[in-house]
Amino acid sequence: MTISLPSDLMVSVSGFRGRVGAPLTPELIGSLAAAFGAFLQLEGSGDTVYLGRDSRTSGAMFTGAARAGLVSVGAQVVDVGIVPTPTLLLAAEEAGAAGALGVTASHNPAEWNALKFAGGDGLFLDADRMGRFQTFLREEEIPRAPWDGLGTVSEDPDAVARHTKRILELPFLEIDALRRRGFHVALDCVRGAGGHMLSGLLRELGCRVSGMGLEPDGHFPRDPEPTAANLVELGELVRSSGAEFGIAVDPDVDRLSLVDGDGEAVGEDLTLALCAQVVLSREWSQGPVVTNLSTSQVVEDVARAAGVECFRAPVGEVNVARRMEAEGAVVGGEGNGGIILPRLHLTRDAPVGVALILQHLCETGAGLRDAVDRWPTYHIVKEKTPFPRERVDEGYAALLEALGPEAKGVDADREVTVDRSDGLRLAWMERREWLHVRPSGTEPVVRFIAEATSEARARHLVSEGRDALGA
């Protein structure tokens, strides 16, 4: 039979997401996994699929369903267990697998789960390949294997160790110097998949760790998205433990946020900026930087200081990764704390971000707040609101009329750059301001992201955007 996707399932290049029980059921997960395994084989990619998950309480149930679905179409399943998503993707790439399937809803709350689909190159399916997969779901019968052609299941317990080893071998890191320095770091893994790997990596880098939320049981003690508002307890741990700074990741460990020595959150966009500075400081590692349309312009400042270009791509890890491939970028990522280092792999990777941050602080001799204060200060405001997707284009038209190049009124500024590659982004370069409005790929909302040199101005831009869209 073909598969009809529930209307309340969130479908994008970020995967298929939904709430546990409705619309996500084991039956749906099993069917989608079977379809993915068959799709990879019909495309000629092969039959080996790596399977991993984060720590959500629904993860074991859905991973079992996915495993069964893959076996039913003759796939050879390699189960890596509870691991960071970048670990899963690196393992699949190194093994030359046909693809990888991650059971994780990333930063979404605990009642959500999802499937993330990746190819053998360790990259999530881009829009073209995801489109072909969705056509396959709608139009093709899943070719189940006969009793003597069923797939097999094996386990790979060493994926985290290999990932850690690859990070420690990166030429950007001065391991002996880091071990002599001996940072004291507070670590919050929100009871996701990162506790084991990040604790081990930090110890390998000579750090003393004060930890919280290291148990991978999926009982998230807070909203798992590592935004400033959700890092209050980590800030308290920094202050009470005397740690030099704090590190927070999301449940599947592809996003990294930082807290300074006073327990104050550092904007997520600064994670990419500081990591990029380390990479670009090496003469043998000069090249472009790529980030998405919703990332702070401080990344452009870092690229400009290094004399290299900074390119923008639509939001979504694979969109940034593909643009990095095209431009030959040496570093990139997203302003939500996602670092991509091609020297390792073209995947957002919080553990490699941790290593680069430590290296940056070690070689500059600065504290985290001092490192951040070297760069211009911008204020970024992010809001979201429910909005009917079928009316988004009308909203964009209203927004252009209110704020675009043809806007009327006293405050009209025709020196505005318009980018329609992902929703609508308006940028006023002279004023160092921008506003990005787009439907979320992970939640049923429209997102408003604005940045300016003052918080009041950024909030004003978001307010103007909401008013125009609402009209």
Image (tube, grey):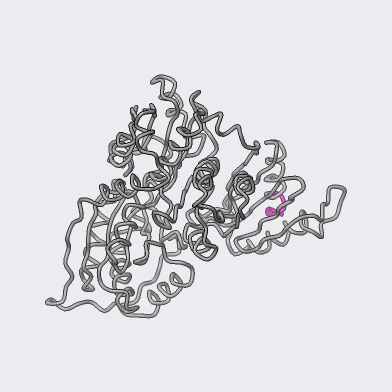
In the shown orientation, is residue 92 left or right of residue 354? left
Q: How far from the left and from the top, in percent, is residue 62? A: 27, 56
| Total numbered circles | 0
| 267 vs 369, nearest the viewer | 369
Residue occupying image coordinates x 30% and y 42% = 197
Would you place residue 196 above or below residue 131 in this image?
A: above
The overriding secondary structure of the stretch rendered in magenta is helix
In the shown orientation, is residue 328 left or right of residue 471? left
Region of the chain picked out in magenta, as a range = 467-471
Residue 204 position by quadrant? top left
Residue 390 position by quadrant? bottom right
Would you place residue 82 above or below residue 136 in this image?
A: above
Residue occupying image coordinates x 50% and y 23% = 262
Would you place residue 443 above or below residue 131 in this image?
A: above
Q: Which quadrant holds the C terminus?
A: bottom right
Determine if the magenta segment contains residue 468.
yes
| 82 vs 105, nearest the viewer | 82
User: Which residue is farthest right?
Assistant: 410
Q: How far from the left and from the top, in percent, is residue 8? A: 45, 60
Determine if the magenta segment contains residue 195.
no
Q: Which quadrant holds the N terminus?
A: bottom left
Q: How far from the left and from the top, in percent, is residue 365? A: 49, 29
User: Which residue is farthest left?
Assistant: 148
Q: How far from the left and from the top, in percent, is residue 38? A: 29, 74
